[in-house]
Amino acid sequence: MQKLKVGDTVQVTSGAERSASLNRGKIIAIDREALRVRVEGLRVVKRHVKKGRDRANPDGGIIEKPGSIALSNVALVCPKCDKATRIGTRTVEGKKKRFCKKCDATIE
């Protein structure tokens, strides 16, 4: 069972984005092979797109989109205690559930 999922709120624990005033956001995408995540509003990069290359932006221009952050540099934020925490798993009624290791609350 994977510990982080798309839609989870995470906090950056190390790296350049840690010092940003807003270092929390929701996970947009996870690349399991490269061990990287994309978090909305963090590590925003600019890409220069030529005219006609992209259906979303046919006129071209400069597009801002979230870059990737190493998976080891983010921690899940517990919805109950609102702190960055490690995650454990336990079996409840035959199904695996994630839980916060700080406040012991079930996540999801």
Image (cartoon, rainbow, N blue to C red):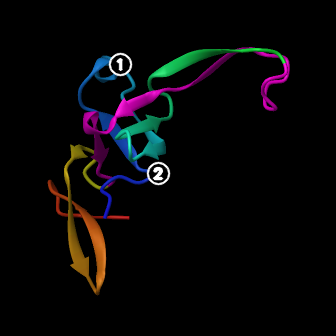
**For the residue carrying disc 2, how many other residues have a C-alpha within 10 Å: few (<14), some (14-19), or many (20+)?**
few
Q: Is residue 4 above or below residue 54?
A: below
The magenta-colored residue range is 52-79
The residue lying toward the viewer, choosing from 30 and 97, is 30
Q: Quadrant of residue 71?
A: top left
Asked if the magenta segment contains residue 70, the reply would be yes
Kindly state the secondary structure of the residue where label 2 is placed.
Answer: loop
**For the residue carrying disc 1, how many other residues have a C-alpha within 10 Å: few (<14), some (14-19), or many (20+)?**
few
Identify the amino acid type marked 2: Val
Kindly state the secondary structure of the residue where label 1 is placed.
Answer: loop
Q: Are marks 1 and 2 in contact (CB under 8 Å)?
A: no
Residue at 51%, 21% in the rendered image: 44
Could you give the CA–CA distance between mark 1 and mark 2, rounded to whole angstroms? Answer: 22 Å
Count of numbered circles in the view: 2
The residue wearing badge 1 is 20
Q: Position of residue 99 (x, y in %)?
A: 24, 63
The residue wearing badge 2 is 6
Asked if the magenta segment contains residue 1, the reply would be no
> Can you tell which mark lies on residue 62?
none
- The N terminus appears in which quarter of the rendering? bottom left
- The C terminus appears in which quarter of the rendering? bottom left
Q: Position of residue 48 (x, y in %)?
A: 67, 13
